[in-house]
Image (cartoon, grey):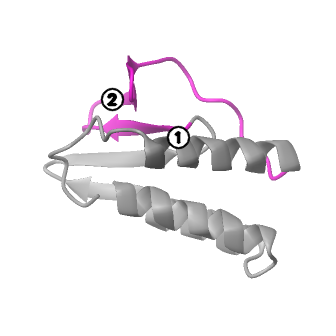
Amino acid sequence: MRRAVAACHQALVDYQTGLLDEDQLRRALYRDGLLLGNGEAWLLDVAGGTWRRYDGVGIERITSHGREGAASPRAFDTDTLSRWQRGLQGLQAAENPLSGVGGG
């Protein structure tokens, strides 16, 4: 999961420096923020700075503090990019609450 967060953070940096366009950024965030394993899919919610777990039945939002409500909307404006970066930095700095989940 830490590798996924780091890869998404790098994609944002690459977008901000002009190495990626918006479509490439979306693809990178999707590709790098999706972990599959043990009958579950973990989806990185970049805007919310959290992970979402999908078990084939429902989606659960997981944070370092437990479960929370709905995610905020996404857009490619400066405020959103800054919020994404802060969320990813928080995930990088936090103790991994999902240790034992494969792929991360």
Q: From the top left corner, tell me how far across and down residue 53 is, in percent.
A: 33, 37
Mark 2, residues whose alpha carbon is within 10 Å: few (<14), some, or many (≥20)? few
Q: Mark 2 points at which residue?
A: 58
| Magenta-colored stretch includes residue 61 | yes
**Which range is magenta?**
49-77
Of residues 19 and 94, the one drawn nearer to the viewer in this rendering: 94
User: What residue is shown at x 41% (from left), y 39% (from top)?
Assistant: 94
Give the image location of residue 41, x and y in percent: 30, 48
Decide which of tag 2 and tag 1 comes sooner along the chain. Answer: 2
70 w.r.t. 33: above or below: above
Q: Which mark is residue 90?
A: 1
Looking at the rendered structure, the kind of residue marked 1 is Gly
- Residue 46 in the image: state x and y as whole percent: 58, 46
Residue at image position (14%, 46%) is 100
Q: Report the residue at 63% width, 40% height from top.
A: 47
> Which of these two is toward me, 57 or 30?
30
Label at residue 22: none
Placement of the N terminus among the 4 image quadrants? bottom left
Q: Quadrant of the C terminus?
A: bottom left
In the picture provided, is 60 more to the left or to the right than 6? left
- Dot 1, crowdedness within 10 Å: few (<14), some or many (≥20)? some
Name the kind of residue labelled 2 in the image. Answer: Gly
Left or right of 67? Residue 9 is right
SS under mark 1: helix
Residue 24 locus on image (x, y percent): 67, 74
- Quick check: is 45 in the magenta stretch? no
